[in-house]
């Protein structure tokens, strides 16, 4: 099974490279050259990557501080980049959270605090994304297309937050005894009900941890989360404007927003070429063929491949063990069964 998984990774990345090569070839046919950009563009994009990585790792550390869990900054950095690596080589980014969990566990963080840190980090990400989408919808002029794409991402985030809110409400109710009659009518038998009860118990633990969080540290983590989202979307503008190319700003922000966050549901590691296709179709009227080729190649590098490489360097072994299901938390407790289900 492991060989099939890595074969799927190789096939997906091959498809992504092939589509990128097709875009580069099209740019070459239209009088372009090798998709090289000026050094200023590379410097700006690399600085965006550096500052985004610093902001996200610091956000994780301050999130842990808000939850009264000591966490070294280096560990927070490994959690962030390790999650990126795990997400890059698994379908629909399914390996991100198991990878982050195992990095925390092997760093000595117990299961319950580790789950709380990960839940809080995801919650900040979703709230930041909703607010950023609302900001774009109100303060940019992108037409119906841009508004629709922003609505898709923002609506999905609101939907996830709504599900989490419903789960929190349900977790506050008593779940002792057999499943309620309405759940039995839906086919929820005793075994599934026990799994639901365990999940609700985890949620109650998370809610109790959030109730005792430090408000000041939470605000710092939230500001860093907003900075992280803004910096992820700044890569393409940095490449385009650093190259001296005149282009409207809105599509340079909206399309990366859609592709980076909406493309996370692609059922193939790294998107399987879906991101490259979306990029080339979405920006074909904004950039010329040669400009589009260079922008695609280097935007994917600075927004995806550089994170994959960095994650492999700082936490590659741990992430692979998490994805293969061979990682074991050094501090086992009953709630660690959630890790097994995530993996």
Image (cartoon, helix red, strand yellow):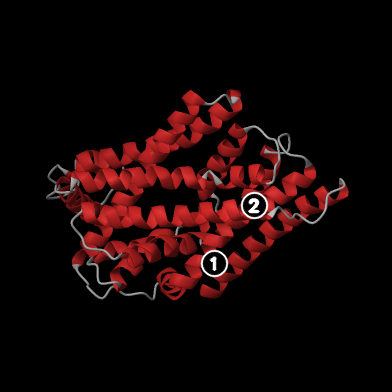
Residue 206 position, x and y percent, is 21, 51
Residue 88 vs residue 309, the one in the foreground: 309
Q: Is residue 125 visible?
A: no
Residue 205 vs residue 318, the one in the foreground: 318
Q: Which mark is residue 40?
A: 2
Q: Residue at x 62, y 49 (%)?
A: 275
Q: Residue at x 61, y 57 (%)?
A: 301
Residue 204 vs residue 293, the one in the foreground: 293
Q: Secondary structure at mark 1?
A: helix
Tell me which numbered mark, 2 or 1, is placed earlier along the sequence.
2
Q: Is residue 330 visible?
A: yes
> Which residue is under mark 1?
309
Label 2 vs label 1, nearer the camera? 2
Q: Quadrant of residue 248?
A: top right
Residue 209 position, x and y percent, is 17, 51
Q: Which mark is residue 280?
A: none
Residue 278 position, x and y percent, is 65, 43
Residue 283 position, x and y percent, is 68, 38
Instruction: Classify 10 as above or below 20.
Output: below
Residue 285 vs residue 268, the one in the foreground: 285
CA gap, disc 2 and disc 1? 22 Å
Q: Quadrant of residue 173?
A: top left
- 230 displayed left or right of 126: right
Label 2 CA crowd tier, 10 Å (few <14, some 14–19, many 20+): some
Which quadrant, please, contains the C terminus?
bottom left
Instruction: Classify 170 as above or below 8.
Output: above
Q: Residue at x 49, y 30 (%)?
A: 136
């Amino acid at each position: 099974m492991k060989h099939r998984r890595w074969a799927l990774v190789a096939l997906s990345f091959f498809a992504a490279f092939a589509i990128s090569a097709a875009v580069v070839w099209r740019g070459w046919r239209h009088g372009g050259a090798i998709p090289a950009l000026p050094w200023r563009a590379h410097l700006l994009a690399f600085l965006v990557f550096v500052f985004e990585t610093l902001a996200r790792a610091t956000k994780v550390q301050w999130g842990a501080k808000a939850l009264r869990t000591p966490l070294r900054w280096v560990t927070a950095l490994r959690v962030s980049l390790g999650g990126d690596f795990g997400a890059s080589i698994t379908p629909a980014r399914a390996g991100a959270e198991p990878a982050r969990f195992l990095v925390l566990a092997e760093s000595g963080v117990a299961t319950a605090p580790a789950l709380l840190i990960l839940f809080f980090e995801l919650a900040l990400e979703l709230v930041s994304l909703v607010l950023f989408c609302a900001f774009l919808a109100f303060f940019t002029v992108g037409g119906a297309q841009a508004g629709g794409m922003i609505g898709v991402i923002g609506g999905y985030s609101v939907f996830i937050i709504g599900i989490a809110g419903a789960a929190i409400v349900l977790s506050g109710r008593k779940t002792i005894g057999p499943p309620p009659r309405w759940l039995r009518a839906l086919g929820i038998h005793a075994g599934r009900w026990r799994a639901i009860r365990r999940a609700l118990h985890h949620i109650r633990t998370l809610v109790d941890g959030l109730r005792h969080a430090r408000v000041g540290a939470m605000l710092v983590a939230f500001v860093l989360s907003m900075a992280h989202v803004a910096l992820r979307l700044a890569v393409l503008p940095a490449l385009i404007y650093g190259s001296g190319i005149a282009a409207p700003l809105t599509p340079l922000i909206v399309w990366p927003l859609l592709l980076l966050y909406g493309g996370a549901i692609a059922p193939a590691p790294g998107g399987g070429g879906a991101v490259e296709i979306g990029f080339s179709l979405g920006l074909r009227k904004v950039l010329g063929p040669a400009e589009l080729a260079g922008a695609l190649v280097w935007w994917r590098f600075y927004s995806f491949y550089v994170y994959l490489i960095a994650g492999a360097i700082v936490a590659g072994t741990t992430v692979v063990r998490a994805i293969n299901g061979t990682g074991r938390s050094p501090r086992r407790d009953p709630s660690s069964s959630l890790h097994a289900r995530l993996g």
